[in-house]
Amino acid sequence: MALVLLFVYILYSRYTFKKEKEKQELFMQVKESEIKALQVQINPHFIFNSLNSILEFIRKSEKDQAAAYLVKFTKLIRMVLEYSDKKNILLKDEIELLKLYAELENFRFNNNFVCNITTSPNLDIYSTEIPSMITQPFIENAVLHGLQNKSSLLNEQGIKFIGELSIHFEEHGEYIKCTIEDNGIGREKAEEIKKANS
């Protein structure tokens, strides 16, 4: 009887372990799909607007600005394409991509914000890996909906606004924590403007 019970227990344990493993694998597939979806989210509007900015520089015969912008833009697109099929990239590469993205957006919006990217001293950006381009959509939201909306509102009132965007990476237990802060208008006001414009 004890032998039968032990056999049943072993079968049940193997079944439970197998089910748990399948559940974990399914969870990881969902997470990878979510990450992949974030990776391809470099906004098509950003690409379109960037090309329009280059065109505008050319129209104004500002060839140096057009060339400088185009060099940065092509570098960013090359990085996006290179990283899009990678599950993880080094944190140093993610930071380089974010700096480049912020520079292009700042250039496009007449240098009306300052971007600071920092890391905690114990975080090794040369060996730490994170999912590629996972932070870019959040930076884009901060710039477009927070900083640019506030800049537009204050410009209408004749007030000069310099935006501040702060991105900080730190170790948080087994994870990397990224904190994004800006002095824009905030989510609620940004949502009101979005609804009013749609």
Image (spheres, rainbow, N blue to C red):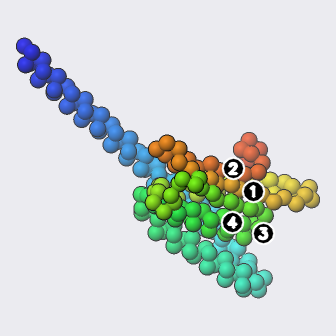
**Of marks 3 and 1, which one's residue comes earlier in the chain?**
3
Cβ–Cβ below 8 Å for labels 1 and 4? Answer: no
The secondary structure type at the circle numbered 1 is: strand
Nearer the viewer's eye, disc 3 or disc 1? 1
Report the residue marked by disc 2: 181
Report the residue marked by disc 1: 164
Q: Please tell me which residue is depicted at 69% across the width and 66% down the height of the picture.
A: 105
**Of marks 4 and 3, which one's residue comes earlier in the chain?**
4
| Amino acid under disc 4 | Glu
The secondary structure type at the circle numbered 3 is: loop
**Of marks 1 and 4, which one's residue comes earlier in the chain?**
4
Report the residue marked by disc 4: 105
Residue 63, disc: none
Cβ–Cβ below 8 Å for labels 4 and 2? Answer: no
Nearer the viewer's eye, disc 4 or disc 2? 2
Mark 2 burial class by Cα count in 10 Å: few <14, some 14-19, many 20+? some
